[in-house]
Image: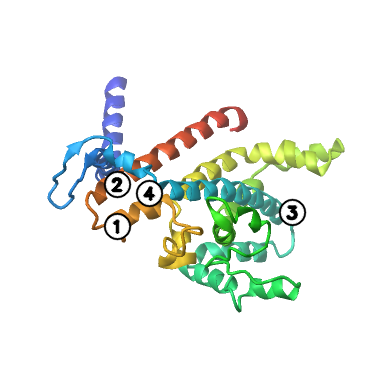
Amino acid sequence: MVEGKKSINFIRGILYLLPAIILMGIFTFYPLFNTFIISFKESYNYMVGSYKKIGFGNYAKLFQPGNSFFKFLINTMVMTFVSVPISITLSILIAVALNSIKSLQKFFQTIFFLPYVTNTIAIGMVFSIMFESRQGLVNSIIESLGGSSVNWLGGNPNAILLGTDVFKDTFFGAQWFTSLIVLLVYIVWNSLPFKILILLSALQSIDKQYYQAAQIDGTSKFRIFSKITVPLLSPQIFYLLITSFIGAFKEYTSVVAIFGANAQSIGQENNMATVVWYIYSYIKGSNATSPGAMGYAAAGAVILFIIIMIFTGIQNLISKKKVHF
């Protein structure tokens, strides 16, 4: 009797999940599997399904000298490993500060959350105007302090600002560095609201008795923060790290919002395109008509998928020791 009831409940559960499983199979698992297959088809023609042979030619092309994929991969890596730690750290500090404010807390929460509900392209246009080379707000401030204006979005190899001279004769160049600064500021600023909301909700759910006991013992605010607040926030921090790393590796919208269609053509030194930009260029962009374009795009997507899975796996291993569920 009991076993029969369990079987019925199991079948009922499967039936409830079946629509979601079917949709995931059609729109997630099949495209993913098909992308792996296409990535090995050299000179693949998507319209007729023909290809020259099965092999690693598409992957080999990605890392050939002169191919921009490696440069775009470096761009993506730098954006990820700079923007994510900065945004997470700032989010924690801002969330803690907001949680400690008694008056006007709702007002400041609204202010910090506004970017999350604002159109990304519109925000990008505002940033482009702020960093405009001639009349932008940032350059106006620099000039008022006695400095020289910088062509942030178009690059200025002669600019001496924040050590950009160090990069002038490197693989990337000062132009790349100045453009990167603008992009990182935008990415961090645009990613803060969601992180702050998650962390603030977690902070407000922490039992106040922990803090009261620490204060009775005379524990300093820094030790309370490092030994109580951060460990109790670790599940939320881990969640934000995972989602932020995945989102940063797939970065595309921010580049378009700041640089528009010029991200790949504003000069070799400050080319700010990402891996996703590269993939898109072979599907619908400037390289879509080249022979075997879909195969190159699929190979790039597979490499990006593998990189994301590796870093996600590493974070999962670290979380077993550092995250307090």
What residue is drawn where x is 76% and y is 72%? 145
What is the spatial separation of the Cα atoms under label 3 and label 2, in whole angstroms?
51 Å
Dot label at residue 224: none
Q: Nearer the viewer, mark 4 or mark 3?
A: 4
Of pointers 3 and 2, the one earlier in the residue sequence? 3
What residue is drawn where x is 86% and y is 35%? 217
Q: Is residue 166 above or below residue 260?
A: above
Residue 139 visible in the shown view: yes
Dot label at residue 296: 2
Q: Amino acid at mark 4?
A: Asn
Quadrant where the C terminus lies? top right
| Residue hosting label 1 | 287
Asked if the residue at tag 2 contacts the one at tag 3, i.e. Cβ–Cβ closer than 8 Å, the answer is no
Asked if the residue at tag 1 contacts the one at tag 2, i.e. Cβ–Cβ closer than 8 Å, the answer is yes
Q: Is residue 253 above or below residue 89?
A: below
Which image quadrant is residue 60 in? top left
Q: Is residue 126 above or below residue 314?
A: below
